[in-house]
Amino acid sequence: MVDSSGELVDPPGVFPLTDDPADSEQPAVVWDGSTFAVAWSDGRTGTGNIFLTRFNLTGTEPEVEVQITHAEEDATAPSIAWTGSALGVAWQQGAGIHLQAFEGAGHPLLCEQEISGGGDSKDPVLVVIDTGFGVAWNDDREGNEEIYLSIVAHEACP
């Protein structure tokens, strides 16, 4: 939209979630009943890392932004799901798919796990199931792209 002076302005209800000179991309969002939880890949550390934060309906950030990964390889393509008490985040890092669960404020509940094995794994999609999470992704371990699924139980970090 353009205002009366010709300046570009956001339409009502649009607000920035990130403000960093590095690229912030590939957002994933879930609603928990009172706030949005947003995960994305961000290049501010020199490599792509996954960040997580929460915002209310007005764009106010009620929680502190949390850097989930501290990767030497780019971490990309986050997928996020809400269980009713925890946030699950899956992402691609290098050739693997990773998963971690967090309480609402971003403190880990489930230790980070690499859940794929074999080929070049990418494009995770995360869903909540009664016993934990289901994660699907595509993978070329058989020589062509195939779809894989992993069921991961809710378990606390040791």
Image (spheres, rainbow, N blue to C red):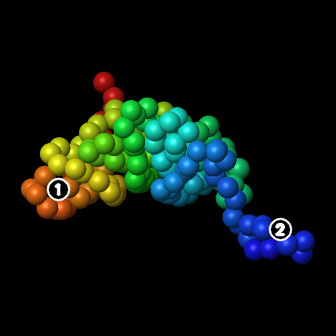
Question: In the rendered view of the protein, which quadrant contains the N terminus?
Answer: bottom right
Q: Residue 87 appears at what percent x and percent y? A: 44, 46
Cα distance between the residues tagged 2 and 1: 48 Å
Marks 2 and 1, the one that precedes in the sequence: 2
* Residue occupying image coordinates x 47% and y 56%: 26
Which residue position holds label 1?
140
Name the residue: 67% across, 47% down.
Answer: 19
Residue count near mark 1 (Cα–Cα under 10 Å), binned few <14, some 14–19, many ≥20: some
**Circle 2 sits on which residue?**
7
Name the residue type under label 2.
Glu
In the figure, 20 relative to 146: above or below? above
Left or right: 33, with 136 as reference point: right
* Residue ranking furthest to the left: 142
For the point 62% across and 40% down, which residue is it? Answer: 63
Q: Nearer the viewer, residue 71 or 66?
A: 71
Q: Are marks 2 and 1 in contact (CB under 8 Å)?
A: no
Tell me the crowding category of disc 2: few under 14, some 14 to 19, or many 20 or more residues within 10 angstroms, Cα based: few
Is residue 110 at all visible to an observer of this figure?
Answer: no
Where residue 31 sits in the image (x, y, percent)?
Answer: 53, 58
Residue 77 visible within the image: yes
- List the single residue furthest toward the right: 5
Seen from the viewer's position, the closer of residues 36 and 117 is: 117
Residue 57: give x, y in percent of width and height.
Answer: 67, 59
